Image: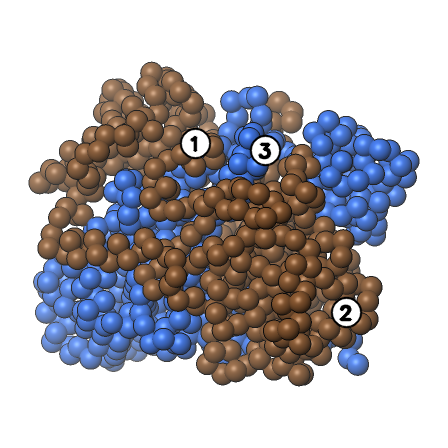
Amino acid sequence: MEDYFSYTAKLFDPAGESKKPEVFKGLRVLDFTHVIFGPTASRVLATYGAEVIKLELPFYGDLWRPATYWGRYWKHSNPIWHFVTQNKYFVSLDLKRQEAKDLIYKMAKDADIVLENFAPGTAEAWGVGYSTLGKINPKLIYLSCSTYGQYGPMRYFPGWDLLAQAASGVLSLNGFPETDRYYKLPDYLGDFVPGNMAAMVLAMAIYYRNKSGKGQYLDLSQTDSMIRTLSNFTYKSVTGEALGRTGHADPSMVAASIFKARDEKFLGLACATEKQFEGLCNAMGKEDLLKDNRFSDYLEALKEENAEALRAIVGDWIKTKDCDEIVALANDKGFAAAEVATDRMICDDEWRRERGSVILFNDEMYGELAIAGPSARLSKTPARTKWLARPLGYHNRLVLMKFLGLTEAEMTDLEEKKVIGTGDDRPGLKPPLYYHLDKDPIYNYGREVKR
Amino acid sequence: MSLFKKKSKEKIYTRYSSAGANVSVWKETVEKLQTPEGRPEVLDDIMVLDASSANFSGIVAASFFAEFGADVIKIEPAGGDPCRKMTPYGKNVKGVGIPFMMEGRNKRYMTLDLENSPEDRETFGALAQKAAVVIETFPAGKMDSWGIGYRQLSEKNPGLIYIAITPYGQYTKKAQEFVNFPDTDITTQTGSGLSAQIGDFKDEPEPYGWPLKAGAWMGWYVTGLSAALGGMMALLHRQGTGEGQMIDVAGMDSYSSMTGFPASIGYTWDKPRPRIGVLDFILYPYSHWKCKDGLVAIAAPRDQDFRALLKILNRWDLEDDFKYTPDRIPDIIEQALELHHQIEKETLKYTADELTAKALGYALKAARSKWRGGGIPIVMKVMTPEETVKNPQWAVRKSFKEVEDETLGKFVITSGFAKMSESPPQIKWVSCDIGKDNEYVKTKYL
């Protein structure tokens, strides 16, 4: 039989991905969401082929457009916004105007999914809630994203990722016991995790609709989503104790902690099984530990004082070796050890490029940018990046004229009334300086352009 | 929490939510969400085999399928999956660890020793003919060498979705070189980019300046969620075409591919980002501070939100120096830390609930203003999980459930993370007994 790795290399070949079918081809999504939670859910759908129409306010746009890391822009765009908004259609509509609502009602007729993450009740008050759109299209799947959910005494509390981290208990678990040091999860994980859960739940709703013909209303709370990832509640109910913060250590696994190697590099190390622990002892040249009553059994070795003693032994050994040596030994002896990877390491890792975990994407407007590949690789219907973020209102003509059949005169009228509009001359909203929108056939859909 | 004790009329803190005709209709919609029990289940037509071993992300992925109604069968040898023993400080009930108890929702248990018994592999192969999804976490190619990999199983069951979870994936030279490298939560956190960004400035005293790990199993839960999400996409393709496929999930991708930050920032910046402790790269104030009774999280990043925060803290004097976002983001660390300390001076004067009430009061006023109305400073007590569980919000939303199992007794688990009006996730039972459903599985599927 063919060698396994040459078989899988063909099965998952990143070069062939763009020719493979898309799961969500023809699925239309109206996306009212902004910042990260909702846009992440629609991003997942867009990478699997859904037609996501991202609706923004004319002249303002998504709040996250201009909000970059340390205020640094890349080609007048927010470099981290490209990942979250890839493959989307950018339409700007002033939701407060009746003309805009009429357009939305028209679009809702053939939409499959609508998402919003305004404060609970806002979409309803604006006449674009489920009670309105669900009547126009009973097969519609409508997702409301919020920090605390659409019902319950806290539903109207405003919120962000940070507040969900605070309210779920997830923030209180990061840091060092008996100190005042606490740290939130980085990079808005309190948005990204719920956003991916939301995408999964949307997929569930589509699966159900395919079977039953029924649309439905979904309520995702980012705090609920973060709560789902914690076993601390179960721990408390079983032991009567709070687990609290555990610093660098993972108290659930043998010898699990972050350590510093001789060359000042940091690594995570852990043993998931007794066999892996044997491998570690073997690598350390301390087979005697296997006979030590404190460590001979997995559960015994996890007891607080035993675990502490073991981490001290392992930590002392790690100090005598370079990080790469430890990782090589881990691979050789069969336990887990991995260096703390920084942005640059991840971006530049050769294997991640080869795998397609980091893709050098060449965009028509922005040129080359490294963009993260999908978190799961599907052999037949892979997720893919087709284009990056676009300036505010970039697809107005394409979507409204091609998909909705508006005429040139109607477009002019809407523009004059400022129901639709393009970007302000601000970074994050406008195209790169070198880019000529007037020569862009998509932006000018329906007009003659000279390339 | 005192904030919720008073049974008063619901207050609306944002300007546009104020009652219209639609809001009463919305109430009906929302009421439907509150009773998940007995509703149709999305995946009641599929069977999932979870053959994951010593890798909790497989268990997490299987749980998501189980919550939505799939018949999920956990396959493990008579000694049990090593995941049963992964538990804080070794705390367990009859040999079952806490995380395993929590994920033992709606699952069946069958004993098969895939590693050692050719006969059991055959049984597994027969079961896989009836399965929609197989989840496994063995070294890449291991199942294939046993004759029960995707290549073999899909021949007889072309509709099979085969999810393989490993640290480095199923292809590339690296995956081959690290084929026996085991998967753990902490190495997933360090290897996929999470640890580099959490923790304090590197010049803090040791070991506080080291990269940190998230207290929760963020590596494994993110990986498990990615696997289930990919699995759902494949199930949709299968539903339409009858065609299955293989899914390759790499733990080392988990954080970097979920946020996308490491790739794009690594590409556009000359240096890797430093760790910046309690500060935030984009938004400020967006952090947590000490207050009278613990910690309080405050988000007031937009200029108008920041002005509102200064007003409720009586610190308008800070406005001149920190007026605009560029004054507050930590590209000049000292400047951002100075603002952090100034804010802490004020938060220490109040309890978290007092600050929350102040912020909500301001938001209420702003929401009613005819004109711009100022910003919304957002405040929340930093709760421990033990405090979270007592919050009435989650009681109303049934986010926790006390469950009972014959063997394990009573305990609390998280439940119902998504509310759906037609086909919500449900917790039907919990159980963890090894081999409990051997007969059930044989009768139903063999």
Labels 3 and 2 positioned on one and the same chain: no
The residue wearing badge 2 is: B120
Amino acid at dot 3: Thr
Residue B147 image offset from top left, x and y in percent? 77, 75
Q: Tell which circle, 1 or 2, labels the residue nearer the N-terminal end.
A: 2
The residue wearing badge 1 is: B387
Q: Nearer the viewer, residue A385 or A46?
A: A46
Q: In the displayed image of the protein, which residue is found farthest to the front?
A: B406
Residue pictured at 61% horizontal, 73% vertical: B444
Amino acid at dot 2: Asp
The residue wearing badge 3 is: A239
Whether residue A84 is situated above or below residue B195 in the rendered picture: below
Callout 3 environment at 10 Å: few (<14), some (14 to 19), or many (20+)? some
**How far separated are the C-alphas under marks 1 and 2?**
46 Å
Amino acid at dot 1: Glu
Callout 1 environment at 10 Å: few (<14), some (14 to 19), or many (20+)? some
Would you say residue B338 is visible in this rendering? no
Is A147 situated left or right of A263 in this image?
Answer: left
Labels 1 and 2 positioned on one and the same chain: yes
Q: Chain of mark 2?
A: B
Q: Quadrant of the C terminus of chain A?
A: bottom left
Q: Colour of chain B?
A: brown
